[in-house]
Amino acid sequence: MSRVLLDASNEITTPYSNSHKGVDVVKKYRSLDTIIAHSDGIVVMVQTGIKNLPGSTGNLSYGNFVKIKHDNGYYTLYAHLKDVYVKQGQRVNKNDKIGYMGNTGNSYGAHLHFEVRNPSDTRIDPTYYLDHDLPNEDRSIKYQSYDLKKKMWLPNVLVNTSSYAGNFGNAMSGIYLDYYKLRVHDKVKNMWLPWVINRNDYAGNLGNPIDGVQIEEATYRVHLKGGAWLPWVNKVDDTPSGYAGIYGREIDALQIK
């Protein structure tokens, strides 16, 4: 069942992407529904009185919306509402009714635009959270690497600490990571391997060393085998600063903050 719709599962009409930092959802069979709070929290922003404004930008593009800060520091945002049932400063509990789907703001048909933002108020892919809990907190997110020489998974470490995953001198060939979307570049095959998310699989090929890493919505860096830490990376694209690593150079450690 949905964590944001009262009576039904979500049907996604527009997925998350680099240009659409949320997901658009309707009730199954493309019908409308009441919107409920994903988790406990405080309403930190409300906008009402907005009509349908195709092409609008900024907060106007959200139409009538509600933004909630949750007890773990994450935020959820619910946009294009027809009706809003809560006020700024109000405390809400999981499953409380907060509004009703609408067609306000930059919208071309009634639906809910749903966003999840991390404690830095940066939008992250909300798809997984449509029917799952938010992370407890940033420091609870874990990751681990596979040591190619020892042929074993190394212990988990925590995001946003001084810890790193890896073993200096031994190439990495796999990575597990909570919540974030991740892929790696296979040095032997000279290709990017498929994206994985939230430990539904590991990123890598356990027989081949990694020479590139990309993690969406995170800040990360890698250590080169026989070398040093490379600069921090905070984006994902095809430019040299859009991934961590150097093609042809084996990676032996990863750090995420």
Image (cartoon, rainbow, N blue to C red):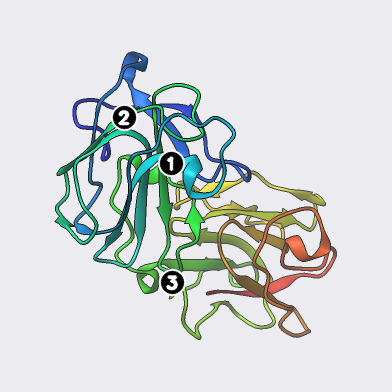
Q: Nearer the viewer, mark 1 or mark 2?
A: 2
Dot 3: element: loop
Q: Residue furthest top?
A: 29
Q: Locate residue 54: give its quadrant.
A: top right
- Please provide percent x and percent y for residue 143: 47, 67
Could you tell me residue 231's position as x and y percent? 72, 78
Q: Tell me the tag on residue 156.
A: 3
Q: On screen, 240 above or below 113?
A: below
Residue contact at pointers 3 and 1, CB within 8 angstroms = no
Q: What is the spatial separation of the Cα atoms under label 3 and label 1, in whole angstroms?
A: 25 Å
SS class, disc 2: strand
- Going by the numbered disc 1, the residue's amino acid type is Thr
Q: Is residue 45 left or right of residue 120?
A: left
Kindly check if marks 2 and 3 are in contact, taking CB atoms under 8 A apart as contact: no
Residue position for label 1: 127
Q: Residue at x 75, y 78 (%)?
A: 225
Tag nearer the camera, 2 or 3? 2
Amino acid type, label 3: Asn
N-term mark: 2 or 3: 2
Q: Secondary structure at mark 1?
A: helix
* Mark 1 touches mark 2? (CB < 8 Å): no
Seen in the picture, residue 15 relative to 125 is either above or below; the reply is above
